[in-house]
Image (cartoon, rainbow, N blue to C red):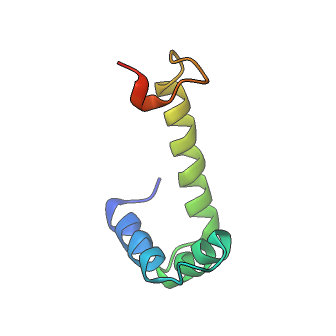
């Protein structure tokens, strides 16, 4: 998992990128600008996706999270 500082640097680099650019390219460029490896960023994103899936496991698949109470 990335540290809070690494995430902050990555997010800053993403925000500074061209908003009209392909999102994948934008993340790749931001990763390089933040001095991170793309594999580390990808692993972090996958770990977050798995965590989110487990958190929402009990919610119906078609119901938006905001509708859950």
Q: Position of residue 50 (x, y in %)?
A: 57, 36
Image position, residue 47 (x, y; %): 55, 44
Which of the 4 image quarters holds residue 32?
A: bottom right
User: At x 38% / y 76%, what residue is drawn?
Assistant: 12
Residue for point 50% across, 35% down: 51
Determine whether, in the image, residue 5 is placed left or right of residue 36.
left
Image position of 60 (left or right of 9) = right
The residue at 50%/30% (across/down) is 64
Residue 66 falls in image quadrant: top left
| Vertical order, 1 against 18 (above or below) | above
Q: Quadrant of the C terminus?
A: top left
Residue 34: x %, y % from top left: 46, 79
Q: Is residue 4 above or below residue 57?
A: below
Q: How many marks?
A: 0
Side of 31 relative to 7 (left or right): right
Position of 64 relative to 39 (above/below): above
Residue 24: x %, y % from top left: 66, 69
Between residues 51 and 24, which one lies in front from this camera angle?
24
């Amino acid at each position: 998992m990335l540290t809070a500082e690494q995430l902050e640097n990555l997010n800053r680099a993403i925000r500074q990128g061209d908003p009209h650019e392909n999102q994948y390219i934008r993340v790749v460029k931001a990763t390089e600008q933040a001095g991170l490896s793309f594999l580390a960023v990808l692993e972090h994103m996958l770990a977050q996706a798995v965590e989110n899936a487990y958190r929402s496991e009990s919610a119906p698949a078609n119901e938006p999270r905001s509708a859950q109470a």
